[in-house]
Image: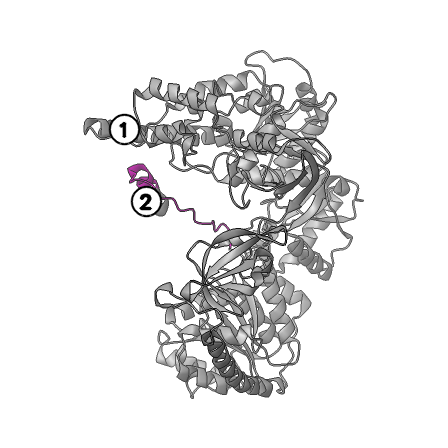
Amino acid sequence: MSLRDIAGIFSKPGQPKQGKNSWQLAGVPEGADALVLAELARETGGRDILHVARDGNRLRRLQQALGFFAPERETIALPAWDCLPYDRLSPHPDIVSARLDALSRLATPKAPGSPARVIIVSVAAILQRVPPRALYANAGLALKTGDTLSLDALVTFLAGNGYGRSDTVMEPGEFAVRGGIVDLYPPGAGEPLRIDFFGDTIEQIRGFDPMTQRSAVKHEAAAINPTSEVLLNDASIARFRVGYRDLFGAVDDLLYEGVSAGRRQIGMEHWLPLFHDRLETVFDYAPDAAVTLDQQIDEAIAARLELVADYYKSRQEMLQKAMRSRETPDYRPLPPKLLYLDGKEWSAALEQRQTIRFWPFAVESEQGRTIDLGGRKHEGFAVARTKRDINLFDVVADSVRRAQAAKRRVVIAGYTAGSADRLLGLFKEHGLQGLVQIGDWQAARALPLEAVGLAVLPLDTGFVLDDSEIITEQDILGDRLVRPANKRKPSDRFIAEASGLAEGDLVVHREHGIGQYTGLVTLQIQHARHDCVCLVYDGGDKLFVPVENLDVLSRFGSEMATVSLDRLGGAAWQARTAKLKQRIADMAERLIRIAAERAIQQGEPMAPTPGQYDEFCARFAFAETDDQLNAISDVMSDLSSGKPMDRLVCGDVGFGKTEVALRAAFVAASSGFQVAVVVPTTLLARQHFRTFVNRFEGFPTRIAQLSRLVTAKDAAEAKRAIEAAEVDIVIGTHALLAKSIQFKNLGLLIVDEEQHFGVAHKERLKEMRPDVHVLTLTATPIPRTLQLALTGVRDMSLIATPPVDRLAVRTFVMPYDPVTVREALLREQY
């Protein structure tokens, strides 16, 4: 039976008989499940597909892959809360926004004849009960330019649907009112909206940047949906109070008191059933959808239910302990059945649905209700990666030709556009013909057999089917760690908005010096209202700065306790600025002289060899961030310019500075020059030595280490080899700065963590670098180094993008909670 036959079963209306609705689809390698979902959705006659992924990472990967395999299909992804069961914390606003957007779309009835949608939920999301559909069905407010709506009615709607009022809108779920303008950030929207009223008429709807608060694109219409699964209105508060007392008696804890007063409490979502008459399940939101289940789904369901039971048990034990000691409990957990489906309810829900379980392994024959798709995971090229005498890309090219001979269309998938372009160049160099860049699966199916599609497709593993084959970047190069690129929004001002200041902060005015910010005031000037920042100076004098002129202010960066305010109109600030300008002029003269001497030096131009350099870059086990790519591009431009490079690369620990150094070292070494890598500690020297050896494996590059951990014999041999140019790259500590070290053809000096080197070491570095390229890496540059970079005497590249999987720290102040402490310790352990 084929996919079309199974989809035909799905397309039949009506509920199946118990026990006759489950199918097992074998031979579905993990990379192919998105393709299977896309094909099923095309053949179901408009019936939705509800797919249960085993975790949140799988959900995100499937959502991305469906954008390639079925771009014409609507995909709805419902993530789970990012907090633990029975937690004290609320889910992150971005998660709440994504959930509400998905629930609102599911609650809105489909138009007759609409194509099938693919709904993806994680195990944690499918087991969690959700607010009833009536809360989201037609609960949104549609706004159009020219419509009549009173501003008060809009504010009432926002307050009643979970939006929080703030001075400045920055995150989903916030709104602000300024005169006849309402700023709001609906869940699921790509940007906040600015609604401009003229009386009771909506004059304009514009999107704006939450960082700069500047308006951008105009919109003709906008949909405003609820922004929280917990709504605080009179009816919901009354339900909560009654339900809480029924379960726990006449109590008066912080949660009960806060909700009764209409205040949103951190973590109140964990008492969600008390705010609604009843809760529903995701199955209720998709009543006619057929269900597909991820691989290893049973194990994931069991693990989630066990986790819920474990945390409920811990909370119950803490509650009983507090009651025995006659203390007031600060956490009263709801029974799991009110919040989550149990094992019996999960099984019963599946029995009422037509269900397909994905199974990665093939079967020998069709037995029972098992269908074998015949697919298999791509075998990969592990052997070629471990043998030096085999070129990996030649092996892949041969594999592609064999697949074409077997009448299979081949697609090579890169994680990012940059990696796909790199693979394109590498395979062309290794003789693979017919490479065509494609955007989706339909374009791949339209390719002739002799062509090879090259796509941006974030799959972990490739797969092989009867008529098609996908080879992923990870199949070729080994494990990769990637994440979606987050574009940072630059700000061109030190203080972007008045809300970035708190009363009492010290600020510096460009003309008047240090003052203290006391608040935002509105002044009536020439019959017009102006919002102004109020600054207080010595003697009580006040200065009002219009908010549109905030660029004249900057933050004061020193300790406030030792600072005295300037006097408006006084000479002290002008005297300090004049003295500072003279010091800067003297320093600039000296530094410019040094920079000029280096500028007239003729450096050796170094350019990467395209083929070898691309292969070296492809060994990087991460996806380069935008900042990292910019830094690499800056260094490559400097090396090829013919002028001595003097560049500072500044970035936090683990942000990818070493990769910039590795690529620079490869270019220098492959151009016939020696490279010296100077580090402050022996531990760092050993770490870098191992990293360089591993990355340069298979290339004709000789690498040595010089530190106190190296034996005297090996150190003497290393010094001799350095002087004889028998070593291409040497990595060492201060020992490299000794006068006994003589390089024969030093072309690149890399200084890691420059702030750990003293003045004497800096003088020795100056002797070593009259015409060599210098690359400095640091996470915390010393003031002089940073000043040289900021004033343009030295070039600087910033790497400010966080590395893979580094999450922002969320800080909460809460009472002592043994369950939270236990969880933190367990996370540290595992």
Check residue 656 for magenta coloring: no
Residue 620 quadrant: bottom right
Give the image location of residue 440, x and y in percent: 72, 42
Disc 1: which residue: 319
Residue nearer the viewer, 704 or 254: 254
**Magenta stretch: dominant secondary structure:** loop
Question: Residue lying farthest front?
Answer: 526
Residue 142 quadrant: top right
Look at the image and give the residue range highlighted in magenta: 803-823
Left or right: 425 with respect to 592? Answer: right
Disc 2: which residue: 825
Give the image location of residue 244, x and y in percent: 36, 22
Helix, strand or loop for disc 2: helix
Badge 2: few (under 14), some or many (20 or more) residues near its Cα, within 10 Å? few
Left or right: 722 with respect to 422? Answer: left
Which callout, 1 or 2, points to the residue nearer the camera? 1
Inter-mark Cα distance, 1 to 2:
21 Å
